[in-house]
Image (cartoon, grey):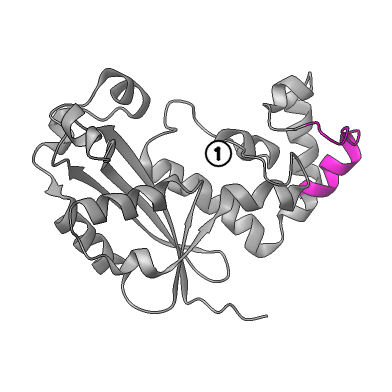
Amino acid sequence: MASIYDQNIVVDFEFAKTTKKAAASGLIHEIIQIGAVRVSPEGDVLDTYSQFVQPDFAINIDTTVKELTGICWSDVRDAEHFSDAMEYFAHWVGEGRTRFVAWSPSDYEQLVKESRTKQAQLAITQMRWLDLQKVYPRLLNVGKRRGRMSLKTASEWCGVNVSKDLLHEALYDARVTAELLRQAITGEYLSQKQVLSDLITPPEKHETLTSSLGSRFADLAKFRDLLAVSA
């Protein structure tokens, strides 16, 4: 069945905390990094995009964000501000029927909130957005139907190796999400689903399987080997 979209844009944003004054007005965070991957309707990676964004309210990058993302104030202080950065991003996205894909709704929610606060008219907020975090547990039949699974955990379930050192870098997270999207588009996830079905005893009605694979299986390497054999 042909896709109704010409392309998928897998996107991930990294945020920084604003000042107390800005937070009091409703804007608690600002986008400081954009990472995106262009994926064809067939699941092929076509291009990537990465850009820092200079915050309008934050005056520094707090320690927690710096340690989590590796982003320093020197990375963003000379970058484009939000409106211009999003204009450049939209230019890269281009025209055509586009579906944006993100892991969790937080990226879209932040984009809408920030664009309203900064009075930036962004056409991309009106396009179709897919929350893959909400879809993937249902595809693999793990966790509660409405459960939330971290990108790292979802990757482990699907046999995708991720780097703890690179997670929370916008482009890296977008690349990992793009790989999960590719598996969903191509149907490759079905092989992982079958292996999981064979290995996991059906949980109790209210049990949630969103913990790390390490807590479910003593030998994670063996489990990943099984995934590789079944692919």
Looking at the rendered structure, the number of numbered marks drawn on it comes to: 1
Q: Position of residue 113 (x, y in %)?
A: 31, 50
- Quadrant of the rendered image containing residue 72: top left
Q: Where is residue 198 in the image (x, y as percent from the top left)?
A: 90, 40
Q: Position of residue 224 (x, y in %)?
A: 73, 34
- Quadrant of the rendered image containing residue 73: top left
The residue shown at (68%, 42%) is: 158
Q: Is residue 108 above or below residue 211?
A: below
Magenta span has 116?
Answer: no
- Give the labeled residue for mark 1: 151
Q: Is residue 134 left or right of residue 59?
A: right
Q: Which of 29 and 215 is in front in this view?
A: 29
Q: Is residue 220 above or below residue 51?
A: above
Magenta span has 196?
Answer: yes
Look at the image and give the residue range highlighted in magenta.
192-207
Which quarter of the rendered picture does the N terminus lie within?
bottom right
The residue shown at (49%, 30%) is: 163
Q: In this view, does 69 lie to the left or right of 194?
A: left
Q: In this view, does 149 lie to the left or right of 205?
A: left
Q: Where is residue 197 in the image (x, y as percent from the top left)?
A: 87, 43
Badge 1: few (under 14), some or many (20 or more) residues near its Cα, within 10 Å? many
Q: Nearer the viewer, residue 138 or 8?
A: 138
Please, what secondary structure does the residue beneath circle 1 have? helix
Q: In this view, does 173 lie to the left or right of 15?
A: right
Residue reaching furthest left? 78
Amino acid marked by disc 1: Leu
